[in-house]
Amino acid sequence: MSRTATYFAMLDLAVQAGAIMELRQNRKAKMQPEVAAQSLRAVEEKWMHHAMSFAECDGNCSDHPKAFEQSCETVALSLVRGSSGDRTVTAEYLTEVCGEAALQDWHREKCQAFAAALTSAMSVEASVNREGFDSLPMCANLWAQTAVEGKARVDKERAERAAAEKAAAERAAAERKEAESRAAAERKAAAERAAAEKKAAEERAAAEKNAAEAHAAAEKKAAEEKAASEARVAKAAAEKKAAEQQAAAQKQAEEMKAVQQKAFEQKAAEQKAAKQKASEQKAVQQKVAQEQTVLKAASEKKVEEKVSEEHGVKEVKAVEGQAAAEKQVSEKQAAEAKTVTKQGVVDVHAAAEQKTAKEAVAAVAQGKAGAENKVGTSSK
């Protein structure tokens, strides 16, 4: 027997011994079926454990039937002995025990099956049961039934485990699928959000770019308009300045022209005056020359006449008086010429007068000398 089977057999014996003691005590204490039910429940748990372990066993599985049969025999004999072999007492007691609240569902069914098997195996004669009750056939049949139930429970538990595993797998698959769906949805939502954010960012960038371009265009237009305005102002200022400069230049040219015209007119006037002056001077000179010629001729004639008529100093004084008269005439003519020609004519007339005076003196001197010569000749 394996160590595990030995452990369970010893545990069963201990439980069964307790049950036997309880059954014996119960008889004295009105048999307390609720306590016996709790003990039998524990025994049934061990029986089902052996049956299920036997169903799951793949190697040497004889330990489980043996342990069951030993436990079954011990419980059966304890009940028979506790009832002093009385089948009716045993049946009534087990009926009370199986009806306790501690035994429900399969525990109650197992209790009732054990009671039926035990009472069926007992003889109606209490003494026979006390002296030679054979529990092995009953326990063998009960084991076969329990083994079937254990296998059914194993199969059921396997099916339940398989179903549970399948359900768990399905739940896991569903959860995985749901998680994948959520992940896909989240990825899709994230992608859509990313796309929306990218689109929004692109739209913002485009809007900012458009705004920047519009702002730049507006600034450029404003700058161009400002430059154009400044250019117009500068052009107007330049044109005004040019006009002013042109007007100033024109005015200066006109003034220069006027000055030149005035200078030309003045020069023309001066030239005309100089020409007129030269003409007047020439006329005066011609007149003075004519007068000088006339005066010279007259003076020479008079001197000759006077010299021929008079002699000596008287004749000379007469000539000098005549020269003084001629001088007065010349001065009068010079004054008239001065009035006409102003300074230039005066200068010319003065020069002519001086020349005439010199010529007159020379003529007088020459006449005097001639007279003297003539007187000398006459006296000879």
Image (cartoon, helix red, strand yellow):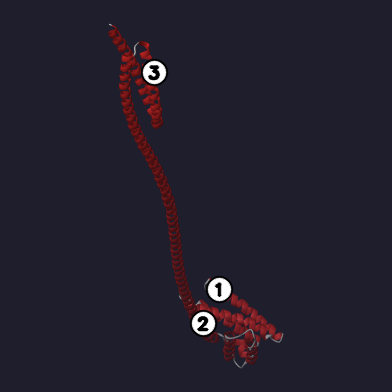
Residue 251, position in %: x, y?
41, 45
The disc, 2 or 3, on the residue closer to the chain's N-terminal end is: 2
Foreground: disc 3 or disc 1: 3
- Say if 354 sits above or below 55 in the image: above
Foreground: disc 2 or disc 3: 3
Residue 187, position in %: x, y?
45, 69
Is 40 situated left or right of 273 in this image?
A: right
The disc, 1 or 2, on the residue closer to the chain's N-terminal end is: 1
Which residue position is annotated with label 1?
6
Q: Could you say whether the residue bearing mark 3 is in a helix, strand or loop? A: helix
Residue appearing at x 65%, y 79% in the figure? 18
Image quarter of the C terminus: top left
Residue 136, position in %: x, y?
54, 84
Between the residue at mark 2 and the residue at mark 3, the CA separation in whole angstroms equals 203 Å
Locate residue 30: give its quadrant: bottom right
Residue 272, position in %: x, y?
34, 36
Q: Disc 1 residue type?
A: Thr
Q: Between residues 123 and 299, which one lies in front from this camera angle?
A: 299
Q: Could you say whether the residue bearing mark 2 is in a helix, strand or loop? A: helix
- Say if 321 sits above or below 270 in the image: above
Foreground: disc 1 or disc 2: 2
Which residue position is annotated with label 2?
153
What is the number of the mark on residue 321?
3
Query: Does residue 163 appear anywhere in the picture?
Result: yes
